[in-house]
Image: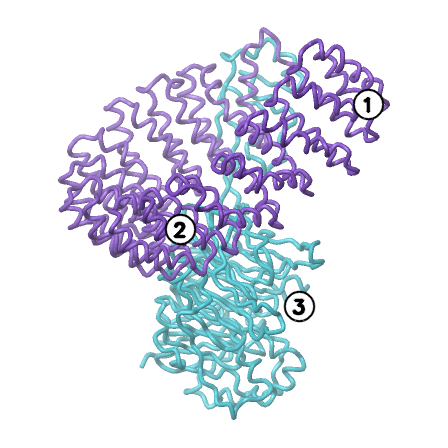
């Protein structure tokens, strides 16, 4: 196809693109649709409106979803190519059809594009074309179009005149009482954002009843969407109104028979507390929260546990200790490991709220309990948030009980757990200080270099680099480098490789002196390793360290080694050696 | 008391004449859609046949019976091989369910032992290029993807403004002529429509055992699928994950005492579903209470006198099918010998137990030997829950009226098709247990053909119209009020 493309054929690619809108190969069709803007630009606004758009409407709308998704999106980007906002109306008919597609993603994109257009078109076309489209979607036979309609109210409302506003509210009300749960769900999803656009009087008189009816719907999937609306509507109303209209729904939802609804309350608890304000949170929501923490369903407890820190930060310390702490104590030995893991994630954040004294009396015991948990995720979560606690109570308090847990995790039989703990070592090191680290964890870091799993060895070398950054070059020179270099004589070539990787990573932080005094001689030895894999990795390592070395050293000591490697019989070794030589 | 309905044979599909037609055509699933205008029939060969009701006035005047005609047919499942487990997966369609209509297309779920598929059946428009300027141009078949007949020179039609042309001509002209001004965007017109079926989603790799039922939720976006030991909850739009809601697999398979035989969602309450077991119990699960519903909310089980226990007790008490009534108030269950109607508010015993073929009791031993005792008969209710339908041997089917307490026993028979107009009703062996002296007890068990069995049945969602599957044939019966 490219061969036909000559200079005079400026439009040829466009013709091909148009043709390929109907190609059998879906990839070509997709490609063409993605370039719709170029096609439209080449055709000019007039022809795009009169020919291209009708053609798309006729031919492509029965295509596969993959194509329709892209088309829905691209149609929204065509406004400037059909002649600007005043002509954008011509994009509405195909989008109206796409808004009724059976695939959710297609509809969502079509609604997005429709919203984009609704904002730009002039008021006259908005009233003559867009609103009728919205109303016809709302009254369509199939629920697919009606669900799409729900997404258009928020953008339409501010632009409509008083009379239209009234009928928009009425139509929305109709959709909230639709026969199908699908439409009700869509209406519930959009209720909050729609309400934000509406005058407060009408919110109270018209939207609140809708909200209440959706929140008491018999379908769980509709009710649970009402929880989010509690937060959105709540932020628009006064305290008294909240107590009167919203609070009963929140309370009912937190006691709902369906765990999915309760789960939503737990999940959005922070937002709910924020929109209700501190007063209502303290008097009313806290009770609901305690119930959720004691829920029978583990999923709900997990979600509630994750909100503990958020909620506690809104309360006074006394209330925390009196109401929340007993629940936390129970959760520490919850039967579900996921609940405990969630708790471990947030419990450390309580320390700053409690202060040193209360942390020691109330929380420390719980931390230690979780550190001994059977489930590695729980322990990991505790260790990852260690800095928050050590700031409050100091590391000495924790280190005694912490170390056994760390050592145990470091030797866990699941390598992912080991990997996770390695990531926290630099953090721990900075908390613990050099002496303590050398004494307790230094050896551990070295054992990881000989781990049977490559990812662990890789992480271990990176860890050494980070430790060097924390403790300084001198420390590294005395403690790490000798140990690392001693691995070079290991009988297994994979461990010898670890030495090379360590040199590469460490070289960037230790400085030229250390490299030339201890690393280069070692590499000189390894040039004659019997495994080609090692030899070409030596060449690769040279590539990393050459830029860090003084040029005289490079010329006198490195170059001869590379020349030697370049004469190797193995072609990979040759290749990497020649690459390194170019840097000399 | 209302008069009994006069059931008349109306149509058959499949199994043209020869009784031992190819095994592939054995009908294992029949289902009406929500409007009753369509019937889906799945067969052992993985095919799904769709029938559409005609609302043609002439034909209905003649017979006054509803008429269904062939609408479409597609291959839903193919035989597969599970290489990990070295198991063949049959293409046989176990169940079909229609999804609520969301646009002009029809959506249905079909399942074999392992894989559930969501099919879209729609009237696809085949489009044709009809640009005014290229009236003589080659007709360009615009159907996407499905049509392979398009001309090799697919750029042909674009460049020409007029006149006859062929491919070579175009290739020569293209260098001079491909200016956009001369280029016409083709216009399309609909030439014809064809009914097309495309698979929309495939839900697989979730069931370790054989899937025995699927059921859609009233929320319109989820469904459950049950196999011998587990029930999974799916979202129709998501085929990458499902949630396990019931798991009765014991840690040690030697402790296995029962399997799940069927499962169904409540018709209106989105959170309630039920499942039946081989031990004769029906359990009601509540999705609200917990993510995993192993702890059932209700259990329907009839006390059995231990003195009546025999070797066969457990086998014949195994429930083969359960259905909710349309309002969700009653549950109909079928075990080997009886049909039971349960009130959802009464767990300890059924409100009605109907003996279907009591006369088989002395024959259980024979039935065990020829494996008939493991046959799984389906059952179904009509729209208002007053009539119940189930099958039996000898191609008998039984329709029970709850109000009049009458039972109608029909024999689904091929002969009726041959002399359709005259002997339509006389060929039907119409029996009512109250009216006629010949009662079910009179049927002699030795005279029964055990190879002929009406395992599958479905009831029209509104009308008195039933579909019954026996071997490779679907029989349709319609009833009119007796005047």
Contact between marks 2 and 3 (CB within 8 A): the answer is no
* Mark 2, residue position: A364
Contact between marks 2 and 1 (CB within 8 A): the answer is no
Choose between A310 and B397: the one closer to the eye. Answer: A310
* Mark 3, residue position: B18
- The residue that appears at 67% across and 65% down in the rendered structure is B21
Choose between A322 and B259: the one closer to the eye. Answer: A322
Label 1: element kind: helix
Decide which of tag 2 and tag 1 comes sooner along the chain. 2
Residue A63 visible (yes or no): no
Q: How crowded is mark 2: few (under 14 residues within 10 Å), some or many (20 or more)?
A: some
Subunit under mark 2:
A
Rendering quarter of residue B332: bottom left
Left or right of A403, for residue B271 = left
Front label number (1 vs 3): 1
Image colour for chain B is cyan
Q: How far apart are marks 2 and 3 (CA)?
A: 82 Å
Label 3: element kind: loop
- The residue that appears at 39% across and 16% down in the rendered structure is A46
Front label number (2 vs 1): 2
Residue A235 location in percent, x, y? 22, 40
* Mark 1, residue position: A571
Subunit under mark 3:
B
Residue B399 location in percent, x, y? 45, 76
- The residue that appears at 57% across and 20% down in the rendered structure is A16
Quarter that holds the C terminus of chain A: top right
Image colour for chain A is purple
Using the rendered image, report if marks 1 and 3 lie on a common chain.
no
Q: Distance between the residues labelled 1 and 3?
A: 74 Å
Q: Distance between the residues labelled 2 and 1?
A: 60 Å
Choose between A301 and B368: the one closer to the eye. Answer: A301
- In the image, residue A4 above or below residue B137: above
């Amino acid at each position: 196809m490219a061969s036909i493309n000559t200079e005079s054929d400026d439009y040829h690619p466009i013709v091909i693109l148009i043709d390929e809108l109907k190609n059998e190969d879906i990839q070509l069709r997709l490609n063409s649709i993605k370039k719709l803007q170029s096609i439209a630009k080449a055709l000019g606004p007039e022809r795009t409106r009169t020919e291209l758009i009708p053609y798309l409407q006729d031919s492509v709308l029965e295509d596969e979803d993959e194509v329709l998704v892209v088309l829905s999106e691209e149609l929204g980007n065509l406004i400037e190519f059909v002649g600007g906002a005043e002509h954008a109306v011509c994009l509405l008919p195909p989008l109206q059809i796409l808004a009724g597609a059976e695939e959710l993603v297609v509809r969502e994109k079509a609604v997005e594009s429709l919203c984009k257009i609704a904002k730009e078109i002039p008021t006259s076309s908005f009233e003559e074309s867009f609103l009728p489209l919205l109303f016809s979607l709302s009254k369509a036979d199939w629920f697919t179009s009606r669900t799409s309609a729900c997404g258009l109210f928020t953008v339409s409302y501010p632009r409509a005149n008083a009379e239209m506003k009234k009928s928009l509210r009425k139509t929305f009300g109709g959709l909230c009482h639709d026969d199908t749960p699908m439409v009700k769900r869509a209406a519930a999803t959009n209720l909050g954002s729609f309400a934000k656009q509406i005058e407060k009087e009408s919110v109270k008189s018209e939207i609140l009843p809708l909200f209440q009816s959706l929140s008491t719907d018999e379908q769980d999937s509709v009710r649970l969407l009402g929880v989010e609306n509690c937060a959105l509507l709540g932020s628009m109303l006064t305290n008294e109104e909240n107590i009167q209209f919203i609070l009963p729904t929140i309370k009912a939802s937190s006691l709902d028979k369906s765990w999915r609804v309760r789960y939503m309350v737990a999940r959005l608890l922070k937002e709910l507390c924020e929109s209700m304000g501190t007063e209502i949170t303290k008097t009313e929501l806290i009770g609901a929260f305690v119930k959720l923490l004691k829920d029978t369903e583990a999923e709900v407890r997990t979600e509630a546990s994750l909100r503990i820190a958020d909620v506690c930060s809104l309360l006074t310390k006394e209330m925390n200790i009196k109401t929340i702490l007993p629940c936390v104590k129970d959760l520490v030995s919850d039967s579900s490991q996921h609940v405990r893991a969630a708790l471990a994630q947030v419990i450390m954040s309580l320390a700053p709220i409690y202060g040193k004294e209360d942390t020691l009396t109330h929380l420390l015991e719980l931390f230690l309990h979780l550190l001994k948990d059977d489930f590695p995720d729980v322990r990991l979560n505790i260790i990852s948030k260690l800095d928050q606690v050590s700031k409050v109570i100091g590391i000495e308090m924790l280190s005694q009980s912490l170390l056994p847990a760390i050592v145990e995790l470091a030797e866990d039989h699941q390598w992912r757990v080991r990997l996770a703990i390695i990531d926290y070592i630099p953090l721990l090191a900075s908390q613990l200080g050099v002496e303590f680290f050398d004494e307790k964890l230094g050896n551990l870091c070295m054992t990881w270099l000989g781990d049977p799993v490559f990812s662990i060895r890789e992480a271990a070398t990176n860890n050494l680099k980070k430790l060097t950054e924390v403790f300084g070059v001198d420390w590294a020179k005395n403690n790490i480098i000798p140990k690392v270099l001693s691995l070079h004589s290991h009988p297994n070539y994979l461990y010898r490789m670890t030495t090379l990787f360590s040199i590469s990573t460490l070289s960037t932080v230790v400085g030229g002196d250390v490299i030339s005094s201890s690393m280069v001689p070692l590499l000189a030895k390894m040039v004659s390793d019997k495994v080609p894999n090692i030899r070409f990795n030596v060449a690769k390592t040279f590539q990393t360290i050459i830029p860090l070395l003084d040029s005289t050293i490079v010329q006198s000591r490195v170059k001869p080694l590379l020349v030697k490697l370049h004469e190797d019989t193995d072609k990979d070794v040759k290749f990497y050696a020649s690459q390194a030589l170019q840097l000399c | 008391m209302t008069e009994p309905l006069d059931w008349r044979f109306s149509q058959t599909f499949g199994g043209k004449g020869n009784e031992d037609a190819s095994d592939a055509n054995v009908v294992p699933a029949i289902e009406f859609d929500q409007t009753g205008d369509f019937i889906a029939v799945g067969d052992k060969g993985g095919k799904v046949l769709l029938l559409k009701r005609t609302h043609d006035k002439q034909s209905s005047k003649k017979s006054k019976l509803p008429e269904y005609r062939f609408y479409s047919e597609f291959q839903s499942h193919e035989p597969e091989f599970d290489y990990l487990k070295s198991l063949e997966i049959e293409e046989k369609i176990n169940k079909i369910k229609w999804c609520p209509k969301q646009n002009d297309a029809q959506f249905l779920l079909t399942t074999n032992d392992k894989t559930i598929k969501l099919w879209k059946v729609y009237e696809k428009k085949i489009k044709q290029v009809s640009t005014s300027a290229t009236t003589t141009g080659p007709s360009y078949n615009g159907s996407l993807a499905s049509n392979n007949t398009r001309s090799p020179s697919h750029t042909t039609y674009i460049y020409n403004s007029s006149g006859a042309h062929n491919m070579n001509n175009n290739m020569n002209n293209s260098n001079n002529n491909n200016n956009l001004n001369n280029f016409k965007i083709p216009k399309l017109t609909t030439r014809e429509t064809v009914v097309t079926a495309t698979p929309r989603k495939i839900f697989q790799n979730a069931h370790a055992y054989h899937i025995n039922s699927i059921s859609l939720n009233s929320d319109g976006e989820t469904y459950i699928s049950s196999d011998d030991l587990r029930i999974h909850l799916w979202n129709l739009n998501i085929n990458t994950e499902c949630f396990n809601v019931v798991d009765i697999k014991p840690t040690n398979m030697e402790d296995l005492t029962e399997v799940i035989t069927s499962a169904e969602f409540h018709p209106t309450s989105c959170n309630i579903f039920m499942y039946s077991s081989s031990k004769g119990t029906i359990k009601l699960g509540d999705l609200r209470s917990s993510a995993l519903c192993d702890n059932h909310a209700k259990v329907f089980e009839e006390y059995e006198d231990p003195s009546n226990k025999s070797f066969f007790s457990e086998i014949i008490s195994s429930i083969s099918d359960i259905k909710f009534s349309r309002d969700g108030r009653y549950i109909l269950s079928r075990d080997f010998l009886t049909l039971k109607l349960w009130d959802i508010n009464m767990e300890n015993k059924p409100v009605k137990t109907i003996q279907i073929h009591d006369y088989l009791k002395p024959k259980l031993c024979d039935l065990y030997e020829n494996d008939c005792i493991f046959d799984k008969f389906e059952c179904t209710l009509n729209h208002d829950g007053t009539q119940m339908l189930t099958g039996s041997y000898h191609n008998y089917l039984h329709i029970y009226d709850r109000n009049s307490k009458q039972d109608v026993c029909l024999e689904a028979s091929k002969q009726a098709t041959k002399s359709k107009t005259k002997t339509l009703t006389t060929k039907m062996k119409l029996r009512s247990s109250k009216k006629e002296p010949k009662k079910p007890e009179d049927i002699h068990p030795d005279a029964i053909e055990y190879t002929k069995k009406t395992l599958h049945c479905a009831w029209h969602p509104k009308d008195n119209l039933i579909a019954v599957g026996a071997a490779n044939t679907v029989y349709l019966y319609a009833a009119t009020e007796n005047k």
